[in-house]
Image (spheres, rainbow, N blue to C red):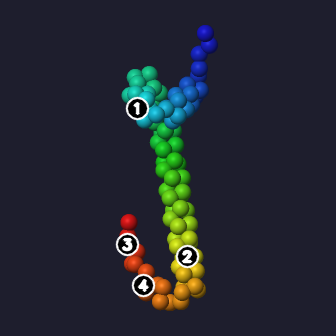
Amino acid sequence: MPTLDDAALTDFIAGIEAAAPAAVARKIERHPLRPAAVAPIIANQRADSEARKEAERADAARAKEARERELLAKLIAKHGAAATEKAPKATAA
């Protein structure tokens, strides 16, 4: 049976751990045969994932704000400035 070199084994374990559900990933992380070189790979993947999620949240917030501004502009155009005075104040979520 052929064996994997260290780099291939590290990439293989990192790929499995990254794709695994959280509970299984924790088991892989604590496994005694897991190469130490996997830790920085997983840390970088998690950081990249968090950065992408944060960028998506920021984009969604900007899009929501733009939609609200557009709606407000339509209300002002339709009903005049009195519409904004009667509108309830937005609360921070």
Q: Residue 29's spot in the image, x, y percent?
A: 42, 30
Residue at position x 50%, y 90% in the image: 81
Q: Could you say whether the residue bearing mark 2 is in a helix, strand or loop?
A: helix
- Sequence-wise, the earlier of marks 4 and 2 is 2
Residue 91 - label: 3
Q: Position of residue 34 (x, y in %)?
A: 45, 26
Q: Earlier in the sequence, mark 4 or mark 3?
A: 4
Q: Name the residue beneath numbered marker 1.
A: 23
Q: Residue furthest top?
A: 1
Mark earlier in primary sequence (2, 3): 2
Depicted 71 relative to depicted 27: above or below: below
What amino acid does circle 2 point to? Leu
- Label 3 amino acid? Thr
Q: Earlier in the sequence, mark 1 or mark 2?
A: 1
Residue 83: assigned label = none
Mark 1 or 4: the one toward you: 4
Query: For the residues marked 1 and 4, what is the alpha-carbon distance in whole angstroms?
Result: 51 Å
Q: Look at label 1 and name its amino acid.
A: Ala
Observer able to see residue 48: yes
Residue highlighted by disc 2: 71
What residue would you read off at disc 4? 86
Q: Nearer the viewer, residue 5 or 72?
A: 72
Q: Residue furthest right?
A: 2
Q: In the figure, is residue 32 to the left or right of 44? A: left
SS assignment at label 1:
helix
Q: Between label 1 and label 2, give the one nearer the viewer.
A: 2
Percent from the top left, x then y, of residue 77?
58, 86
Residue contact between numbered discs 2 and 3, judged by CB atoms under 8 Å: no
Tell me if mark 3 has few (under 14), some (14-19) or many (20+) residues whose alpha carbon lies within 10 angstroms of its own: few
In the rendered view, does 93 fall on the left or right side of 76? left
Comes first in the chain, label 3 or label 1 = 1
Q: Nearer the viewer, mark 3 or mark 1?
A: 3
